[in-house]
Image (spheres, rainbow, N blue to C red):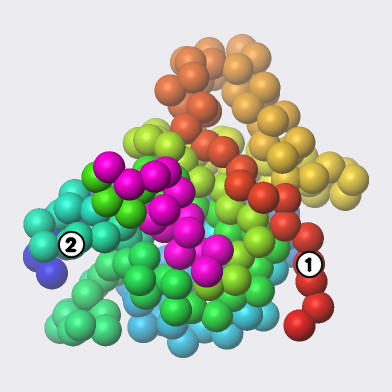
């Protein structure tokens, strides 16, 4: 799909994923990025083995791209697109994944958005991930700044890495407070940078 290829890349996402991976002791080989981050690669992964799944990319609302009538995450399109791999992981495709994740992080724009215009919030990507087996989500209510998303997510994971008693909600709250009070980055104190994100569910592990 040519429209997907025209979407601007997000250089900050590599740093975000690398930092989070170190904090949760994940091998670099478990990070899919750049040309490796395709629909085919995601669908082939044994996703039910992962307790944390982290997407750092573009999030699209329904009809944001012509011909795409449902919310989607932007991945890397193949050289020859097909109906199974066109560079967009749509809500309906996400709902068919087999997850067993305590936390799915959607570091992207509008991931808490509705399935379509006029529908209730969280009925799009968020609901699809819950259907697929996620027990908690980090999602956004509007467009996000890439550099701010990096700070917010990495600081939240840093809080949990520093103290295992800190839960996801508290880690996110502390990260937001740090962004508001950090004198080295005063611009990020404005709510437009940290307020889009919200945690849905606290999500502990369950036996299957």
Residue occupying image coordinates x 35% and y 71%? 92
Q: Earlier in the sequence, mark 2 or mark 1?
A: 2
The magenta stretch spans which residues? 118-131
- In the displayed structure, does residue 84 sit left or right of residue 165? left
- In the rendered image, residue 49, in percent from the top left (x then y), is placed at 67, 80
x 65%, y 74%: residue: 100
Q: Pointer 1: what residue? A: 205
* Quadrant of the image occupied by residue 41: bottom left
Residue in the image at 11% along x and 62% along y: 67
Position of residue 87 in the picture relative to residue 127 (left or right): left
Residue 21 visible in the current orientation: no
Q: Position of residue 84 (x, y in %)?
A: 26, 84
Q: Position of residue 101 (x, y in %)?
A: 65, 68
State the quadrant of the C terminus: bottom right
User: What residue is at 60 percent from the left and 71 percent from the top?
Assistant: 133
Q: Secondary structure at mark 1?
A: loop
Q: Quadrant of residue 51?
A: bottom right
Residue 170 visible in image = yes
Q: Is residue 29 magenta-colored?
A: no
Secondary-structure class at tag 2: loop
Quick one: 119 or 207, which is closer to the camera? 119
In depth, the one of 15 and 88 nearer the eye is 88
The residue that label 2 is drawn on is 68
Cα separation between marks 2 and 1: 34 Å
Residue 23 is tagged as none
Q: Residues within 10 Å of mark 2 (few under 14, many from 20)?
A: some
Q: Is residue 158 left or right of residue 137?
A: right
Image location of residue 25, percent across then percent down: 74, 64
Magenta segment: does it hold 127?
Answer: yes
In front of the other: 152 or 26: 152
Q: Is residue 105 above or below residue 162?
A: below
């Amino acid at each position: 799909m040519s429209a997907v290829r025209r979407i601007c890349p997000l250089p900050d996402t590599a740093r975000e994923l690398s930092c989070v991976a170190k904090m949760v002791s994940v091998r670099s080989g478990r990070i899919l990025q750049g040309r490796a981050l395709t629909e085919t690669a995601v669908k082939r992964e044994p996703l039910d083995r992962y307790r944390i799944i982290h997407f750092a990319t573009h999030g699209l609302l329904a009809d944001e791209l012509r011909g795409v009538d449902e919310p989607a995450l932007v991945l890397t399109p193949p050289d020859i697109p097909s109906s199974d791999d066109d560079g967009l992981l749509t809500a309906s495709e996400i709902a068919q994944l087999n997850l067993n994740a305590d936390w799915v992080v959607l570091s992207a724009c509008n991931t808490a958005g509705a399935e379509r215009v006029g529908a209730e919030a969280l009925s799009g990507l968020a609901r699809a991930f819950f259907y697929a087996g996620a027990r908690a989500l980090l999602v956004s209510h509007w467009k996000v700044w890439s550099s701010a998303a990096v700070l917010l997510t990495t600081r939240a994971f840093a809080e949990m890495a520093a103290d295992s008693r800190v839960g996801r909600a508290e880690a996110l709250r502390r990260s937001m407070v740090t962004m508001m009070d950090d004198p080295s980055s005063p611009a990020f104190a404005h709510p437009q940078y940290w307020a889009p994100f919200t945690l849905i569910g606290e999500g502990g592990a369950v036996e299957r």
